[in-house]
Amino acid sequence: MNIIIIGCGNIGFRHLGSILNLNAKKNIYIVDQSDVSIEKCKNLLYQHNDHNLSSFFFKSIDDINFNLEIDIAIIASNSNARASLIKSLFSKAIPTHLILEKLLFTKISDFNFFLDYFKKFKTKVWVNQWLNSEFQFLTDQINSNEKLEVTIYGSQWGLACNSVHFLEWFHELSSRESLKISNHSFSKVIESKRAGFYEICGSIQIVSKNGNKLNLICDDRDDSESLGPLIKVKSKSFNLSCKMTASDLSGEISLYKENFRSFMQPLKYQSQRTEIVIDELIKENYCYLPSYKVSCEHHMLVYPYFNDYFLANNIDTANGIPIT
């Protein structure tokens, strides 16, 4: 099995750590401009000492002389570099499967361009979003036959960069019926943790064709005690409330006016599940991640609104929307 990871910062490093749990014989090609990132990956591989693994390191895709088939490619770069990295990769080798991180791109024009691009090369493309066992656990508690109102509320949880995760989950809860924005109100642009990128505070309301509602609410309070957004799901017979932290989903559920039942579900980074994704792709030619097409729909639902708000706040978007 030939796997290439392009971008081995924090996310790419977690991808690598998960891949090392695969028992299959594998060749891993790691590409990163940073000597620090490369050295960190080498140390991890040295500690792992896997006899089924061969590893190769490169500063640039252009440095690789491809005479091989790539089974799985993972691009874990910032969103503003992703389009050029995809083109560089495909000029060398056409992967069978490509896994991309969100946010996909900064330029709106790239979304449709790559829809056609991937079709031409017949590569199956997946987006590394949160529809995994923790959110499946929440989904399993919900009666999807009733009208649902889902609310995500908190301080600085990343309305611009993380909304697509919750859109993916809400889309699943809504039986993949079409979504549209019914209202939005943005209040402030703030600097992101990553230099050169920004975040937006405010709210977005989304409705599904079958009548479900999603409220995304993010304020700008500098709340040091806030560990993550609060998630609420309500219907006529059901109430769920939980807090999302870096390590778990914890909260309580009530059904038909019964006493509340508490729960705590451990939470992993999605990039720590790459071994599961790859195993599914190799065995089934399919995985549980959203396809590029589905993820595009979620991105394009909110991107035009983000773009307009940045422009209204004198932030240039000619080279792309500055969110990652």
Image (cartoon, rainbow, N blue to C red):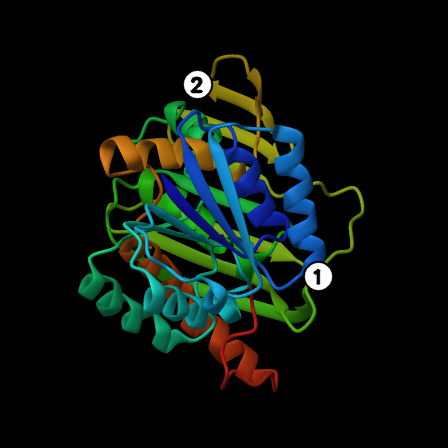
Measured in 3D between alpha carbons, the distance from the residue under mark 1 to the one under mark 2, in whole angstroms, is: 40 Å
Residue picked out by circle 2: 255
User: Sequence-wise, which precedes: disc 1 or disc 2?
Assistant: 1
Q: Which residue is mark 1?
A: 193
Q: Circle 2 — which element?
A: strand
Q: Amino acid at mark 1?
A: Lys
* Quarter of the rendering occupied by the C terminus: bottom right
Q: Quadrant of residue 144?
A: top left
**Does residue 295 show up?**
yes
x and y percentages locating residue 323 in the rendered image: 56, 67
Query: Callout 2 environment at 10 Å: few (<14), some (14 to 19), or many (20+)?
Result: some
Residue type, numbered disc 2:
Leu
Q: Residue at x 58, y 63 (%)?
A: 59
The residue that appears at 19% across and 66% down in the rendered structure is: 120
What mark, if any, has residue 12 been given in the picture? Answer: none
Residue at image point 28% right, 71% down: 112
Q: What is the count of numbered marks? A: 2
Residue depicted at 65% across the width and 70% down the height: 188
Q: Is residue 233 visible?
A: no
Q: Is residue 41 left or right of residue 221?
A: left
